[in-house]
Image (cartoon, rainbow, N blue to C red):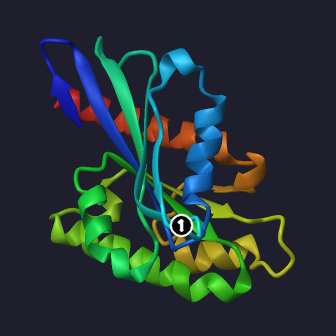
Amino acid sequence: MFINWAKREISVKIVYYGPGLSGKTTNLEYIYSKIDPSYRGEIVSLKTKDDRTIFFDFMQFELGSIRGKKPHFRLYTVPGQRFYASSRKIILSGADGIVFVADSQRNRLRENLDSMLDLEQNLIAEGRSMADLPFVLQYNKRDLDQILAVGLLQKKLNFLNAPYYEAVANRGIGVVETLKMTIQLVIEDIERKLRA
């Protein structure tokens, strides 16, 4: 969180984390399409030839006020591929909230676990932990045939007992709900910090 006291603005960073091709970019593209253009900036998407995010997606929009200050939410995704580890660290730095987008497919459990471990290691390197941040899980691709039961995903991935949502991001199912919960948790966290 960054506060511009002169303009009475709060800049809030929410990072969508998860393995490659889990649906992080799809979430942001859907959200972007649903926000009134007068309340959002441009979306920046850097992709390779096979349509994978290389660095990040960035979107800014405004929403209400927090203790008399105008919030600007900036949404980012990290590249999930292993060889972009340093990019993930940079993008994650200073995050105020995290959405972990898990791929529900049975054959992707290992990638989900590896990405969750990578997330925690990157936060520890920053002197933080997932337990210290507003954190929401999204179990994406629930429309596919070979998927894991939500109960098993909960057992394997949701060791913090965080809020979670089932989603089909390419159809917008669960996308807005995930973001709303994340924003709610981030606002509550910021208000606690501003009272301290």
- Position above or below: 18 against 32: below
Q: Quadrant of the C terminus?
A: top left
At which x and y percent is residue 107? Answer: 68, 88
- Label 1 packing within 10 angstroms: few (<14), some (14-19), many (20+): some
Q: State the residue in front, 164 or 75.
A: 75
Residue 40 location (% of width, % of height):
48, 25
- The correct choice, above or below, for 115 with respect to 23 in the image is below
> Camera-side residue: 13 or 68?
13
The residue at the point 51 percent across, 58 percent down is 162
- Residue 93: where, in percent of width, then height? 23, 56
Please tell me which residue is depicted at 34% across the width and 63% down the height of the picture. 130
Above or below residue 178? Residue 77 is below
Tell me: 122 left or right of 182.
left
Residue name at image x 73 percent, y 53 percent: 170
Q: Amino acid at mark 1?
A: Arg
| Quarter of the image with the N terminus in it | top left
Q: Is residue 146 left or right of residue 77?
A: right
On the image, which quarter does residue 101 sit in?
bottom right
**Residue ranking furthest to the right:** 145
- Relative image position of residue 58 (x, y in whole percent): 41, 43
Q: How many marks?
A: 1
Q: Quadrant of residue 119?
A: bottom left
The secondary structure type at the circle numbered 1 is: loop
Which residue matches tag 1?
Answer: 52
**Position of 38 relative to 1 (above/below):** above
* Residue at far front of view: 49
Picture quadrant where residue 66 is located: top left
